[in-house]
Each structure stands twice: as structure tokens, then as C-alpha cells.
Image (tube, rainbow, N blue to C red):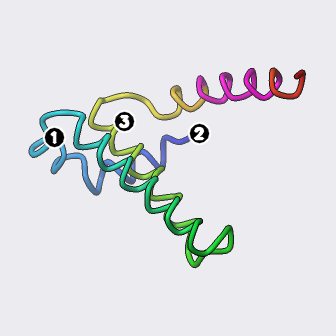
């Protein structure tokens, strides 16, 4: 499902990250920064903020880079996440 996207991100950044990044704190900080940028744009410009979709996609790219660094499969992780999401939505609807 996400294997092609993960491969593309890997081609761009895997070697640099493996060589230069020694703890996951880098990726956690980068993810927090990217999410913060989305939040700031939404607060300032609303859901139609200029290129907000690119800012959201940045979160996905960083997440894929992090999964590459961890040497984890994004497709399998995504499948498991979808299962969790479905269960949560079903609980939400049942309330």
C-alpha cells in the first residue's frame, strides 16, 4: 500500500539519516515541528490555507523517513493503524 512511497523517501534520505541520525529524538522533534506548522497554518488561514495539504503531506514524508530509519515496513504499519482507526470510529459512532 505504502511501499512505493516508502521507497521514494528512502532513495532521497535513507543514507543521510543512517549516517547522521543517532537517536529517534530527531524524528520526534521533526514530526512535532511539521504538525505545529499545520496547526499554525490552520489557525491563521483555516482549512483552505494555501498549500495546507502539502504541510500535512510533510508529516507523512517525515513519518516514512522515520520508518525507514527504524527499518520498519510502512505498509504493514499502515494496515495495523487502519484496523485501530476502524475500531476507534466504531466505538465513537456507538456512543
Name which residue lies at 53% across and 69% down: 41
Membership of 23 in magenta stretch: no
Give the residue at mark 2: 1
Q: Earlier in the sequence, mark 2 or mark 1?
A: 2
Instruction: Decide which of 11, 54 is in the foreground and name it.
Output: 54
Q: CA distance from mark 2 to mark 3?
A: 14 Å
Instruction: Decide which of 35, 56 is in the foreground and name it.
Output: 35
Give the residue at mark 3: 67
Percent position of residue 36, x then y:
44, 56
User: Mark 2 packing: few (<14 Cα in 10 Å), some, or many (20+)?
Assistant: few
User: Mark 3 packing: few (<14 Cα in 10 Å), some, or many (20+)?
Assistant: some
Membership of 89 in magenta stretch: yes
The quadrant where residue 94 appears: top right
Q: Earlier in the sequence, mark 2 or mark 3?
A: 2
Name which residue lies at 29% across and 45% down: 29
Residue range (magenta): 80-90
Label 1, secondary structure: give it.
helix
Q: Residue furthest right?
A: 94
The image shows residue 12, relative to residue 41, as above or below, that is above
Asked whether the residues under the numbered discs 2 and 3 touch, taking CB atoms below 8 Å apart as contact, a structural biologist would say: no
Give the number of callouts: 3
Percent position of residue 21, x then y:
14, 42
Percent position of residue 82, x then y:
66, 30
Q: Earlier in the sequence, mark 3 or mark 1?
A: 1
Percent position of residue 10, x then y:
32, 48
Q: Which mark is residue 18?
A: 1
Label 3, secondary structure: give it.
helix
Label 2, secondary structure: give it.
loop
The image shows residue 64, relative to residue 33, as above or below, that is above
Instruction: Decide which of 82, 94 is in the foreground and name it.
Output: 94
Amino acid at each position: 500500500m505504502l511501499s512505493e512511497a516508502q521507497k521514494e523517501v528512502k532513495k532521497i534520505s535513507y543514507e543521510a539519516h543512517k549516517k547522521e541520525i543517532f537517536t529517534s529524538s530527531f524524528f520526534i522533534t521533526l514530526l512535532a515541528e511539521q504538525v505545529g506548522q499545520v496547526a499554525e497554518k490552520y489557525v491563521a488561514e483555516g482549512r483552505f490555507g494555501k498549500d495546507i495539504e502539502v504541510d500535512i503531506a510533510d508529516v507523512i514524508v517525515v513519518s516514512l523517513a522515520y520508518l525507514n530509519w527504524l527499518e520498519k515496513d510502512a505498509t504493514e504499519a499502515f494496515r495495523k493503524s487502519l484496523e485501530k482507526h476502524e475500531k476507534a470510529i466504531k466505538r465513537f459512532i456507538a456512543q
